[in-house]
Amino acid sequence: MGDVQVKSSKGSKLKVDFNLLQSGTWVLERKGKQRIHYFEKNVGDGKVVIYNALDVPSPFDSKVLDYLMLKSQENDWSQEIVIPAISTIIKDLGLGKRKQTIERIKKSLKILKNTHIEFHNCFIDNGVLEHFEGTWELVSIGILAKYGLERIKGRGNPLSVKVVFDNDFISLCRHSLGYKLIPYAPINGLRDTAYALYKWAWRWFNAEKGYGERWIGSGKSLVEWYKNELNSVGNYKYPSEILRRVKSAIKQLNENPEVSFYLQLKEEENNYKIEIYRKEQCTIKREIPFDKLPPVLCRTVISLIERKKHIREPFALARSMSWEELERLLKGVVVVSVPKDIWEFITNDVMAKTPVETEKKEFEETVLGVEEQGDEVLVAFESSKLKKKSLITTLLDAFTPNWRSFIQEAVGYLKEARATKT
């Protein structure tokens, strides 16, 4: 394969496979004289293991890798690329051209050559790796197969860099069907924690919806989240230290005009989460239709998402939905007004005490949402469940025969909420 010259990266978006995105940005630091060559991080029910025979991969090395991946991508994911001069890398990364910087770039190439990533029970098979089709308990791939430096004739005798990616690594990057496109421009100017948080946020940000969110825990779980996602060997024992660093990183990202989203750290019931908004939506307060809904519809929306879409975080999806999407989801749902004492009798005396487990399960699955309003209770059902002689219709007929006179379509409540939104 011939030498491949690089193109401009201005305005480029880096394609990052989900496997590489979930393995993090390899933010592994050296603390004092500590040298770590092995690191594990949990991913779902599995784990990712990062090995290095030379030194600890740092945020700097991860940025160099992002740069090299972008150059390969801009050249049709060529396995082999040539950078005409090492000074080009330094300039494109926004670094000062000093002797120590040149040596640091050389060291990064060595580190990337010696780094291997193992996926234990968490590799997402996209059918793109020639040697690893199907389900594997463990997949181990390298990053760089080889690299070389060459002095070439010209002004200043520039040092040319040739990089050859590991075949499986570049195949995963090129052919992946599960990936995120991450704007490259902001990466270079970010400090280490902000850089790691930027990559992490893109993992959860839905660019189409303009929103994303993720719970990050509290107490020990917050410390574990930080070590697992942002800084693997950061020597921080207290949540207050983590929050201080995360807040500082969020501030840097929010103030960076090239970062396309806006982060907010929120605390709810002693648990922290990060919300991610499209930045242009933050000049005014972002409207979240889900938050405007009455409680009976909020619970109903969550129930429907859990049943129909089977996702782990229904609240994140619910809060990203537009009025139109909520209306489509609630189509076919009705809300029935039932006297409070009757509903309590049905739930506490009849259903709670029935020995028939199938009836309990049917009742629980039929009720989508409940909201108390004084002496009345609003109960949401799928209308299809009320058209036949079901358990719920039998109960309502028995204890409140005129219940059909108090049925209203859920979409009607939705339209009321939308009309009165502030």
Image (cartoon, rainbow, N blue to C red):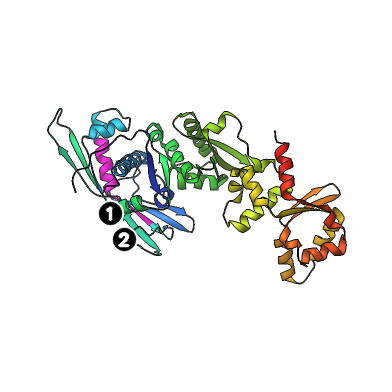
Q: Main secondary structure of the magenta part?
A: helix
Residue identified by numbered label 1: 167
Residue 31 visible? The answer is no
Q: Position of residue 122 (x, y in %)?
A: 44, 58
Position of 372 with respect to 72 (left or right) is right
- Front residue of 348/332: it is 332
Q: Position of residue 394 (x, y in %)?
A: 81, 66
Q: Amino acid at mark 2?
A: Glu
| Secondary structure category for the residue under label 2 | loop
Q: Which residues are magenta?
A: 103-118
Quadrant of residue 89 in the image? top left
Q: Farthest residue to the left: give it.
A: 153
Quadrant of residue 334 in the image? bottom right
| Secondary structure category for the residue under label 1 | helix
- Is 302 situated above or below 244? below
- Is 385 situated above or below 270? below
Q: Residues at badges 1 and 2 in contact (C-beta under 8 Å)?
A: yes
Residue at mark 1 to residue at mark 2: CA–CA distance? 9 Å
Q: Amino acid at mark 1?
A: Asn
- Front residue of 38/286: it is 286
Q: Position of residue 85 (x, y in %)?
A: 21, 34
Q: Residue at x 48, y 28 (%)?
A: 255
Quarter of the picture holding the C terminus? top right
Q: How many marks?
A: 2
Q: Residue at x 25, y 28 (%)?
A: 98
Q: Earlier in the sequence, mark 1 or mark 2?
A: 2
Residue identified by numbered label 2: 130
